[in-house]
Image (cartoon, helix red, strand yellow):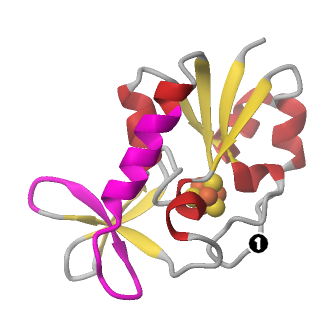
Amino acid sequence: MKQVAISACLLGCNCRYDAKENFNEKLLQSLKDYELVPFCPEDHCFGTPRPTMDLVKQTDKIVAISNENQKNLSIPIQRYAQDFFEQHPNIELFIGKDRSPSCGVESAKVYDVNKNLLHTQGTGLMAEIALEFGIECWDAEVYVHYVNN
Ligand code: SF4
């Protein structure tokens, strides 16, 4: 059965920064023939609830910066993602929560270092690594729209 990596909050896990979820029934219906492999890099690395973070474009790269203390939180998320995809080599599809700085595929806000919004098509840090592994990646809302139209 085809394995799909999916943001755990989309399955109803209360792992968002505010300890809520993003359950998406239409999405689950469209994936009913697949084996779902949930992940949540932020819960794993920082616990729940937790302060929010945003993607910030520095000179040569995009990093995740804590909105609480301005620390760069990128490395633990990238390590989690690397380990996850190494441990699940048969993942064929990645479905990430739209707009998340970790899981969004083409929908995360990206700011400059002065916190001015640059654009809203950023790729979250875990989605970025999924793409590096050659996995087909979709934002959840875009995927639901695609399979239902
Ligand atoms: S969007 Fe990603 S990091 Fe955020 S709660 Fe959902 S699975 Fe966790």
**Which secondary structure, mark 1?**
loop
Identify the residue at image location x=47%, y=26%. Answer: 86
Quarter of the displayed picture in which ligand 1 can be seen: bottom right
Q: Position of residue 77 (x, y in %)?
A: 42, 54
Tell me where residue 138 sits by quadrant.
top right
The quarter of the rendered structure image containing the C terminus is top right
Visible in this render: residue 99?
A: no
Residue on which the image places disc 1: 20
Closest to the observer: 89 or 130? 89
As drawn, 148 above or below 51:
above
Instruction: Tell me if residue 69 is in the magenta stretch.
Output: yes
Residue farthest toward the bottom in the current orientation of the protein: 68
Q: Position of residue 36 (x, y in %)?
A: 76, 31
Closest to the observer: 124 or 75? 75
Identify the residue at image location x=48%, y=55%. Answer: 102
Q: Is mark 1 within 8 Å of ligand 1?
A: no
Image position of 35 (left or right of 29): left
- Mark 1 residue type: Lys
Residue farthest toward the left in the current orientation of the protein: 59
Q: Position of residue 70 (x, y in %)?
A: 30, 82
As drawn, 138 above or below 11:
above
Range of magenta residues: 59-84
Visible in this render: residue 45?
A: yes
The quarter of the rendered structure image containing the N terminus is top right
Identify the residue at image location x=81%, y=49%. Answer: 11
Image position of 63 (left or right of 124): left
